[in-house]
Image (cartoon, rainbow, N blue to C red):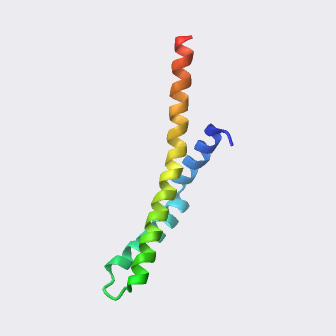
Amino acid sequence: MDTHVKAARAKQLLEDEVFKEAFDMVLNAQVGVFQYPTSSEEEIMEAHRMVRALTALKGQLQSFVDDSKLLERRQNKVRHRG
């Protein structure tokens, strides 16, 4: 998939209100596990994995957006030099 298309789709997701609300609800539920004194060690480990996975997913989407911006800047520098 083209870098700019991927970036545009990733940006759409990151800015989508339903996606943000769903993402935040899932993340907050997992973070909440750490706050419950009755959470088992297994529940805490699973919540930790989920938080890491969600953070990685959001980071990857942002990376697609950032990669497109960097590519665009490089292309603009080449155009201005030529």
Q: Quadrant of the image for the N terminus?
A: top right
Residue lying at the far top of the rendered structure: 82
Residue 19, horizontal then vertical, whole percent: 54, 61
Reply above or below: 69 against 13.
Answer: above
Which quadrant holds the C terminus? top right
Determine the residue located farthest toward the bottom in the rendered image. Answer: 38
The residue drawn where x is 42% and y is 76% is 45
The mark tally for this picture is 0
Q: Position of residue 17 (x, y in %)?
A: 52, 58
Name the residue nearer the viewer: 25 or 54. Answer: 54
Residue 41 seen in the figure: yes
Q: Out of 61 and 49, give the one closest to the viewer.
A: 49
Residue sitting at the far right:
1
Of residues 17 and 59, which is closer to you in this image? 59
Residue occupying the point 55% across, 31% down: 71
Can see residue 15? no
Residue at x-position 46% and y-position 70%: 49
Residue 23 pos. (x, y %): 50, 64
Q: Position of residue 36 (x, y in %)?
A: 33, 83
State whether residue 52 is above or below residue 29: above
